[in-house]
Amino acid sequence: MPWPLPYPFELALMQRALVAGVVVGVFAPMIGTFVVQKRMSLIGDGIGHLAFAGVGAGLVAGVWPVWGALVFAVVGALGIEWLRARRETSGDLALALFFYSGIAGGVVLAGLGRGLNASLLVYLFGQPLTVNGEEIAVIVGLGAAIVVTMLVLRRALFAIVTDEDWSRVAGLPVGALNTVLAVSIAVSVVAAMRIVGVLLIAAMMVLPVASGQALARSFRGTMWWSVGIGVASVVVGLAFSRIWGLAPGGTIVLLAAACFALVTAVRRGAAFRLRSGGAEL
Amino acid sequence: MAAPERIAPRRTPGEILLEAEGVTFGYGRTPVLDDVSLRVRAGEFVALVGPNGSGKSTLLKVMLGSLSPRSGSVRLLGEAPERVDRARLGYVPQRPTLDSEVPATIEEIVLAGRLSRRGWWRPLRRADREFVHHALESVGLGELRRTPLNELSGGQQQRAFIARAFATEPDLLVLDEPIAGVDAESQRRFRDSLAHLIAQHGAGVLLVSHELSAVAQDLDRVVILKRRVLFDGPPAELAASGVSLGMHPEDLPLWLEGLR
């Protein structure tokens, strides 16, 4: 029995998509604030591709692809963090290694199973309109765990992503906190892949933060602006996708990108007016 | 603003806070430190100086536990560096490169200084905020606490990092080139802050710097390092040998260059 919501959210499938999407709109930009500050904006992409390999492994093994994606993403995130922390290789090279291995592994594993079928495309590009009750429970559960972790550890995580060397001398458990952050990113990717797809999940971690940091004057403010923009992108994106029959995952991300373009244009316009006004004085 | 009540016990005057004894270290076959000994006591203000490549930064890393000496020993706050209670240590790194991707206010930066004292997993309380505000007032940044760090001058940013170290209520404060390229007003504030920390809280301070003119009057000892300790004594003794710290600010850097 659907809730009495107006068009375009009057259908049960739209309402399920709305619940799952709003949860993603909260936790992805929240964790993204730490990811962007750490200058690892592409880590979501790298782990997304590993999750794709996990989906393929799940299809081959005949288990729910989400569990396969979770195992691959968490192990991969720990591997990336291990390489980064040991400085065995540069951060972007470590990401590239996992990035390409993940996508190649996913294709090979899916080929061994039922091929590049529709269920694989759902995880690649996202399809919030077909999420079922079990998937919503997983998204909400994982999302709640991420939000609680980020809120409880926000000051310590802020310290390590802004100044890792100082944090180490100050006695913060830098290795453990980096591991918590890496695992949280992996869980975020898996929780969000049914909504925006593994190819676009990194965008939901980064684009709202790009807008948020332009609007806010503090780390805390950036986080909450990013969450607001993330949720708004999901709600408006789902509405547009229903009204005009667009792909929902892509529409959500395009709106987040449009928001960044708008914020940047308004800020540059304001700065230009300020300079012009200053010149007249 | 009145100083909030200090949680940690004050140090016993004269207590040894930092002690390096016969430290030797090298990178591969290149010797960097040779039989270096150095002490900092509670209530003491010590400057460590030396020409570029003299081993200052390496000695700092050894003393803070980031590197292990080949021979010799280090005691930090009475413990081996890996076992020390880091909440008692304040540290200002050399030219901190705080990422400006996301704006962060000075208050947010300095609040991080309370994490080791309070416990990084515990929520901060009103008393912690009072310590932070007091630390910001002591470096003259109280009015700017809600300003993003990347909107401040280099000198103001450096004062914010010093306030972060103060916010830990350190028994020992270690500063690595904190006033390099900093304006005169910031240098004056810096000197006042250190004098306050030593006089009011009995902390020990180890300052690594080429520029000692701003603090020349307050130093108890100067240690000159060039792989080995070449001099360890009061500034007056150094001045008696013809090297000035304060009257002619250029004297010390030029003299250090001559040691290379």
Image (cartoon, coloured by chain):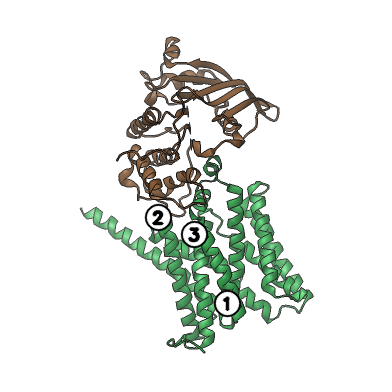
Chain colours: A green, B brown
* Mark 1: amino acid: Ile
**Residue A136, numbered circle:** 1
Residue B224 coordinates in the image, percent (x, y): 51, 20
Q: Amino acid at mark 3?
A: Leu
The residue that appears at 20% across and 53% down in the rendered structure is A281
- Within 10 Å of the Cα at label 1, are there few (<14), some (14-19), or many (20+) other Cα atoms? many
Tell which subunit mark 1 falls on. A
Same chain letter for marks 3 and 1: yes
Decide which of A120, A26 is in the foreground and name it: A26
The residue under label 2 is: A218
Image position, residue B163 (x, y; %) = 40, 40
Residue A151: image tag: 3
Direction from residue B229 to residue A9 in the image, left or right: left
- Point 76% across, 79% down: residue: A114
Disc 3: host chain = A
Amino acid tagged 2: Ser
Measured along the vertical axis of the image, is residue B132 above or below residue A102? Answer: above
| Residue B38 image position (x, y, % from top left) | 55, 22
Callout 3: SS: helix
Residue A128 lies, in percent from the top left, at 56, 79
- When asked about the image quadrant of residue B114, the answer is top left
Per the image, label 1 sits on a secondary structure element best described as: helix
Residue B207 appears in the rendering: yes
Q: CA distance from mark 1 to mark 2?
A: 33 Å
